[in-house]
Amino acid sequence: MEATAPTLSRKAQIDQTATALFRTRGFAATSMRELAEALGLEAGSLYSHIKSKQELLHRICFRLADDFFAGFAAATHDAAEPAAVQLRRAIESHVRVLTQDVAASAVFLHEWRHLSEPARTEFLALRERYEAGFRLLIQRGIEQNDLRTPDVAFATLTLLASLNWLPSWYKPDGKLPPSEIAHRLADQLLLGLANS
């Protein structure tokens, strides 16, 4: 007997379809009419489920932001651990979030620019807070004599830029599972920061 996939709620179907369209066409180039057609709905009936494209983009971006923060919190919960260990786990968590839903990750990383105010300002503040967490880990790793870099901010941006390229090349059906990609990326990135 074959297992059947769970039926998605209409809201989940809309989110999933919008995410796919925003990834392939971009937020600005995707119309509500195209979204309705892709869902097999009349454009007017789509509005009974959502208010606007902005609502969808907001949901996608802030859901992933919540996932990134939850992963970072879990990776850094034990303040007694060396910062380099916490940084490794934060990197691995970041990769897990990116690979969990590659389309949503791509939208999060590239389409946030289309968020309207005040959501855009809130999103940028969250991004700054998230990056600050990585900067703090790297700074603590330097103070613990486990890491080295002449510029903590530059090291943080390089690390996150390297990780955030992942949705451009990651294939869910590729030869490496997300856990192995996370491990290899953490090894590679931490090697460049190691104080050896």
Image (tube, helix red, strand yellow):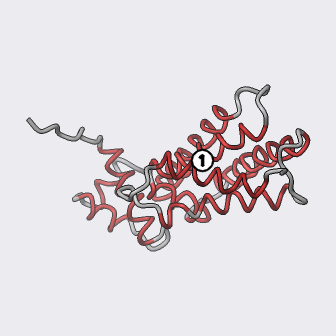
Horizontal and vertical percent for residue 116? 61, 59
Quadrant of res 153: bottom right
Furthest residue in direction front, as rendered: 196
Quadrant of res 34: bottom left
Q: Relative to residue 72, is residue 111 depicted above or below?
A: below
Horizontal and vertical percent for residue 189? 69, 56
Horizontal and vertical percent for residue 64? 54, 47
- In the image, 193: left or right of 63? right
Q: Nearer the viewer, residue 97 or 13?
A: 97
Which residue has dot 1 on it?
A: 94
* Quarter of the picture holding the N terminus: top left
- In the image, 100: left or right of 155? left
The 10 Å Cα crowd at callout 1, few under 14, some 14 to 19, many 20 or more, is many
- In the image, 8: left or right of 191? left
Q: Nearer the viewer, residue 6 or 161?
A: 161
| Residue drawn at x 51%, y 56% as measured from the top left | 105
Residue type (three-letter) at the residue carrying disc 1? His
* Secondary structure type for disc 1: helix
Q: Nearer the viewer, residue 51 or 188?
A: 188
Quadrant of res 77: top right
| Residue drawn at x 85%, y 55% as measured from the top left | 152
- In the image, 173: left or right of 107? left
| Residue drawn at x 58%, y 64% as measured from the top left | 165
| Residue drawn at x 81%, y 49% as measured from the top left | 135
Horizontal and vertical percent for residue 22? 44, 64
Q: Nearer the viewer, residue 9 or 104?
A: 104
